Amino acid sequence: MDGLKEELIASTRRTLAVSRKNARIYYVKPPVIIFGLLFPFVMFLAFAIGRGIEPALLTPRILGVTVLFTASSVGPLIAPWERMMKTYERLLTAPVSLWNIIVGDIISGFLFGLLIALVPLVLGLLFFDAVLISPLLLFFALLLAGLCFSALGSLMSALPTELPANVMMLANLVRFPLLFISGIFIPWEEMPNWVQLLAYLSPLTYAVDLFRWSFGEGNNFQPGVSCILLVLFTALFICWAKWAHQNGIKKMY
């Protein structure tokens, strides 16, 4: 029993070491800053300005766009960048497991997403007159959404390539459709039936619905249902990422 406990503690330390390494190196990389910080704000404002949406109603939607892009921007950069710099092989031969690497990458994206999400949240509360009805629900919604989208970013980073641009292109090919089918720019009731069916397959749909619940807006799903589905999406992305990374390593090495 003591040996299992020591191994668990050692594994946790290795995972956190990977996360600290990622934070020091990749939080300030231009692709992360552009696609994770600037792009979601510019993208949302381009669609929000001139549409007559009340500023207070923008806050949960801005949170959805921000968490999606920020949490999923770190992961897609790490693996291809390290392959390009020839440090990925060193990491694979270090006394860390693939799980340590994947979970460490996910924690890095998760923390980055939470940190940046505080910006639109504070702005919405202070300047947009947004009224936060359930702080506890918002807290759990940010945790679940951040983990889910960070796991999605780790999954996309499994693409067997040494060019970060290739993975970032794949990431945008995945993230852009999610924006338009998840009720952010087009209200759920105004979407065609076939788009509503696709929206059920988007984790962003449930994240945005939780954010709207937190601010007292109308909703499409019960909070418990959205939380459970986000947990299931996260588990799916993590397991899929593990499988994809293993196959990518076999193809490249």
Image: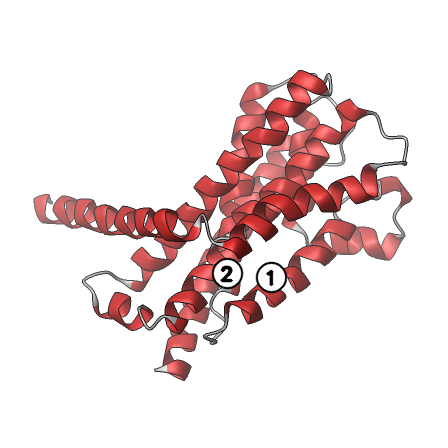
Q: Is residue 53 visible?
A: yes
Residue at image coords 15%, 44%? 5
Residue 219's image quarter? top right
The picture places residue 218, in percent across and down from the top left corner, at 79, 28
The picture places residue 59, in percent across and down from the top left corner, at 70, 29
Q: Is residue 74 left or right of residue 45?
A: left
The picture places residue 99, in percent across and down from the top left corner, at 33, 59
Q: Is residue 26 left or right of residue 128?
A: left
Total number of numbered discs in the rendering: 2
* Colouring rule applied to residues: secondary structure
The kind of residue tagged 1 is: Ala
| 171 versus 253 height, above or below | above
The answer to which of 88 and 202 lies nearer the viewer is: 88
- Is the Cβ of the residue at disc 2 closer than 8 Å to that at disc 1? yes
The kind of residue tagged 2 is: Pro
Identify the secondary structure beneath mark 2. Answer: helix
The quadrant of the image that shows the N terminus is top left
Residue at image coords 55%, 29%? 118
Query: Mark 1 = which residue?
Result: 171
Specify which label sits upstream in the sequence, 2 or 1. 2
Query: Mark 2 = which residue?
Result: 76
Residue at image coords 88%, 53%? 193
Residue at image coords 64%, 24%? 123
Identify the secondary structure beneath mark 1. Answer: helix
Q: Which mark is residue 104?
A: none
The picture places residue 186, in percent across and down from the top left corner, at 84, 44
| 17 versus 211 height, above or below | below
| 115 versus 242 height, above or below | above
Q: CA distance from mark 2 to mark 1?
A: 7 Å
Please tell me how crowded label 2 is: few (under 14), some (14-19), or many (20+) other residues with Cα within 10 Å: many
